[in-house]
Image (spheres, rainbow, N blue to C red):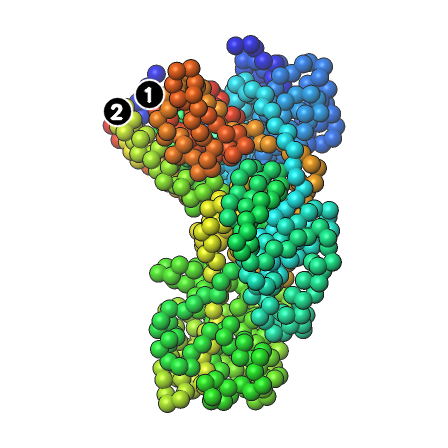
Amino acid sequence: MDRSLSDLLTQPQLTPDRVEKKPKLLVFSTEKISDPAIDLAGLLKKHYPYSVYTISVPCSSCIKPRWIMKAYEKGFAGVFIAADGTDCSFGESCVEKTSATISQTHSLMKEKGLKPSQLKMAALCSVCAEPFVKHMTSFIKELESLVVSSKS
Amino acid sequence: MNRKKIGVYVCHCGGNISDYVDIEKVKAAVKDEADVYLVKNTLFACADSSQKEMVNDIQNDQLDAIVVASCSPKLHLNTFRGVAERAGLNPYNYIQANIREQSSWAHSNNKPGATEKAIHLVKAAIAKARESEPLFSKKIPASNVVSVIGAGIGGMRSAISLADMGTEVYLIEKAEKVGGHVAGFGKVFPVNKTGIQLIAELYEEVRKRTNIKLFLNAELIEKKGSIGNFEIRVKTGTEVLILHVGGFVVNTGFENYQPTNGEYGFGQFNNVITLPEFKKLVDFSDKLEFKGKPVKTVAYIYCAGSRQDEEGENKYCSRFCCTSAIHTSIIAREKFGDITNIHFHRGIRTYGKQELIYEQASRNGDMFLQFNLESIPEISSKGDKALVKVKDLLTHGKNIEAEVDLVVLVTGMVPRENKSLESNLKIPLGRDNFFNEIHMKLRPVETVIDGVFIAGTCQSPKNILETLNSSQAASAKANSVLTKGELSLEPVLAKLNPANCTWCGKCAEACSFEAIETVDYETRKVARIVEANCKGCGMCTPVCPSDAIDLAGFTNAQMEAMIDALAD
């Protein structure tokens, strides 16, 4: 079932304590390069919104548009691809191939009334903890403002 | 689909997780998930006692899959895959949820948020485990023979190390002699031996070992097969040899940076030369003269071709050149007496023991002036001499001029161009165009091409000691992989459903590893995955218009089940 942006803030609260509701953001991250950066952010206790969830993949070029669309359909407000960039151990062509996936997904998103800015990609090397946190914080803020404008 | 019995273990990691994540809430939230048979918490999941408990549970309760919610898989994926294997469970039916680095630590400022996220991460891992299928590594025989490409100082060191561990070595050198750049060096720091002596000693060791076969004037022209079983063709003169090897250690070295015309006056003024040219002058002349004129004052301009700005290609530091320039300036003074050395640098990087020669040069009275990219030294001609002008950062930007007999550009390393080798071995290049290792800290000397290891300066600029260290590391790694005589291949491979395939060729086009070919299936052509070549990157999967390819371990069913669980 498709969800509108304004539905995104109605996710069930799973803990009785107060949890500040945030739009959900799904990150596809690569096992060898960007996963270590995300782990490093945690190790350094660099905080970012808790509604950021990560799924690991071997290489960003294996991400299918249908997975991204599934995330929106299920209620994620944004999807972020943490790519290896030119550091990819499978070869530099992964950047070009992931970009092609993003273009294809943008077309599918348009059909569903989703904004292209709800899908982002950036290269993250294995020590890019700080850039990861910045990307997540600013993306969540952007998604919050999208939700607000959608509601109004 | 058959129901699975899944065991879930939630780790406290001492207090690293449980100080921020409410473990009891996590357990309560996941216990009723479909297929979850048991949920336990454990103080340290990685402790021997916890591992034994998991083995017992898997065996006694006939579990089909287990989930451990703990730290990063980078730390303990293999630990828990080992637990599964010891209990008779397929290791790929083990899924790890990272609730430490990605939950308790990342959200230590928000305990309810960390708990909520941990619950979702564990549910996603359970969903993946539910969809997981046993994957089986293929065992293939492996030949304990390694082809070392390049017989410079690193290549010979690799060959000797491998030979001493019992590996047969084919040492393949393109040139007519061994030794590479180092064979042309005079004294090198810190051993006080010449490069020629070092090479002669290593060459003698190579000759002593009957399990090293050296091919000079030889070039790898073709490679077939995969790790453990490569067939290579090596051209030596007019002859082409066919050899069988299990792997490669690539030690093909570097090239010296060649300054562009006009760069610091190079090619424009007669008395501007590079460091390798100056080293030859110092090492092999009786008098320090250049073009018939005595040299008494030398200006060294550092970082020529290294640490370039955004317009230059070489952003990296070449690591050896500060030491080499200072060492050469010391040798020049020792050998030729009254030489004035003026060093124009961008911060001296004589790290570790090499700091000693920086100190020695300073004590000798060498002058050190510092510049940055905003105000690089200007070179002009003044009669027979060269005039070097610089704004010196060490004297608060004072403009200083020096009249010198010779300007030496301290040039760094650049990657050696070797298209044929790149294409035959398919080693990816990094952003600096050197060969790319998988990870400088976690998996150094390994490349994404199984069985191909890289060492020395073909991977990145290194000094001689660093080259020898990485050469020994690559040898140890190659030997450890091949010495058992058989190999287990990683089972994360592309899987094709031929019923859905209409052979458009897009998957083969997307694959960088020649892992997809076409075969006849019923009355039509379909794709076939060449498992020995498949690297498990999945590049072929999203391009298939009929979604006929899945990646084992990352199937549509698994990924979409995880998305469902995370979104819930």
Q: Is residue B185 shown above or below A52? A: below
Residue shown at the point (34%, 16%) measured from the top left: A1
- Residue designated by label 2: A111
Q: Is residue B284 above or below residue B310?
A: below
Q: Judge by depth and name the residue closer to the eye, B537 or B229.
A: B229
The percent coordinates of residue B65 (x first, y second) are: 61, 19
Binning the other alpha carbons within 10 Å of mark 2 as few (below 14), some (14 to 19) or many (20 upward) gives: few
- Label 1 sits on a secondary structure element that is loop
- Identified at 69% across, 50% down, the residue is B162
The x and y percentages for residue B50 are 71, 27
Q: Name the disc covering residue B333, or none.
A: none
Please tell me in which quadrant of the rendered image residue B180 appears: bottom right
Give me the residue at 27% from left, 29% from top.
A107
Q: Quadrant of the C terminus of chain B?
A: top left
Q: Nearer the viewer, residue B285 or B392?
A: B285
Residue at left offset 61%, top offset 14%: B5
Residue sitting farthest toward the front: B238
* Chain letter of the residue carrying label 2: A
Name the amino acid type tagged 2. Glu
In x, y percent, where is residue B83?
A: 68, 27
CB atoms at circles 2 and 1 under 8 Å apart?
no
Q: SS of the residue at dot 2?
A: helix
Nearer the observer: mark 2 or 1; the answer is 2
Q: Which residue is mark 1?
A: A3
